[in-house]
Amino acid sequence: MLCVPRCRVVGIDYSLAPKHHFPTAMNECMEGYRYLLANAEELKIDTARMMIGGDSAGGLLAMDIYLSLEVSERPAGLMLVYPVVDDSQTTPSLKRFDDTPAWNSVNNAKMWDWYLAGQEYRSPLDRHTEFDVQHLFVEVEEFDCLHDEGVMIYEALSPTCGHSVLLDNKGTFHGYDINFKADITQESLRQRISKPSESAFRIDHPAVKCERFMSLAAENFKTQQNAMVFTGFLFPEIITRMVPNITVAMTIFLIAKSIRLSFSF
């Protein structure tokens, strides 16, 4: 795995749907982000080189947080990994992939119902003209019901970005990276780490190959100057309700938790 030294990664342990509805999770993540801003000097963070990122529902939270912040508070960039983007759910990929593993259009519709609970909401795609993000990384998967809306948000935001990257993986599905040792996962992780670093973080030295990501992060903890705020993976409580087999449900629950924690070193 490739690691970029001098980058502080912060994971937000936010409240989950369906027990907690919008905007609870977003507000909690904003509180965490603002804590970093307020304590940047003590934490040795350069606020001009901060990014917010997330995968799946975490990508949605990242965008909603960005739009809810004051302009002066906004981070330099966004990292969106197979993100949830639009509650209208009308794209061809959502219509096509209704039985794919890990995530599909049926589960996606339930997620939106439980998350919003009938509240009025304007999606990031609907509000795309309000973004002024300078650095953008979006990753989408070929066999993912969210593929098309991920491409759509990239196409909507990238024209005004100073630096943007779209990673359109082939042969992958939503949550494919639970197979951590797979070549495609390792390559995607390398892209997720190196591309934002080249632009927003402006790190001159090459990424460092290491076997234990956490040990390198711990080693560099005292000298880190950048910050990446990750906002989670899926809604584990929703997943357990959707999967009838409790063993499978708990496995997915633990995977979702471990993926969130894997970005919290």
Image: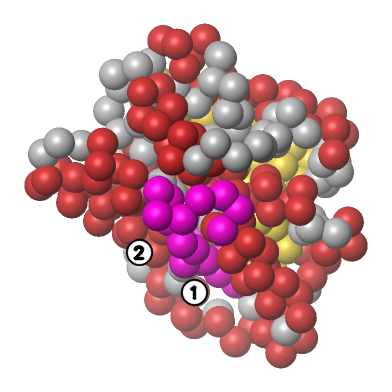
The numbered mark at residue 126 is: none
Colour pattern of the rendering: secondary structure
Residue corresponding to mark 2: 211
1 vs 2, front mark: 1
Q: Does the magenta stretch include residue 15?
A: yes
Q: Label 1: how many residues lie within 10 Å, few (<14), some (14-19) or many (20+)? A: many
Are dots 1 and 2 in contact, CB under 8 Å?
A: no
Left or right: where does residue 206 sit relative to residue 250?
A: right
Label 1 secondary element: helix
Q: Position of residue 47 (x, y in %)?
A: 79, 70
Between residue 150 and residue 112, name the one nearer to us. 112
Name the amino acid, label 2: Glu
Q: Where is residue 70 in the image (x, y as percent from the top left)?
A: 85, 59
Left or right: where does residue 145 sit relative to residue 80?
A: left
Task: Give the quarter of the image for residue 224.
Answer: bottom right
Query: Main SS type for the magenta part?
Result: loop
Residue corresponding to mark 1: 217
Q: Where is residue 27 in the image (x, y as percent from the top left)?
A: 63, 61
Q: Where is residue 18 in the image (x, y as percent from the top left)?
A: 40, 48
Residue at position x 47%, y 17% from top? 94
Please report the bounds of the magenta region as a residue range.
Answer: 1-24
Q: Relative to 115, is 208 above or below?
A: below
The answer to whether residue 13 of the structure is visible from this angle is yes
Q: Earlier in the sequence, mark 1 or mark 2?
A: 2
Residue at position x 44%, y 40% from top? 114
Name the amino acid, label 1: Ala
Label 2 secondary element: loop
Task: Give the quarter of the image for residue 80.
Answer: top right
Q: Does the magenta stretch include residue 85?
A: no
Gap between marks 1 and 2, in whole Å?
12 Å
Q: Relative to 42, is 5 above or below?
A: above
Residue at position x 57%, y 49% from top? 22
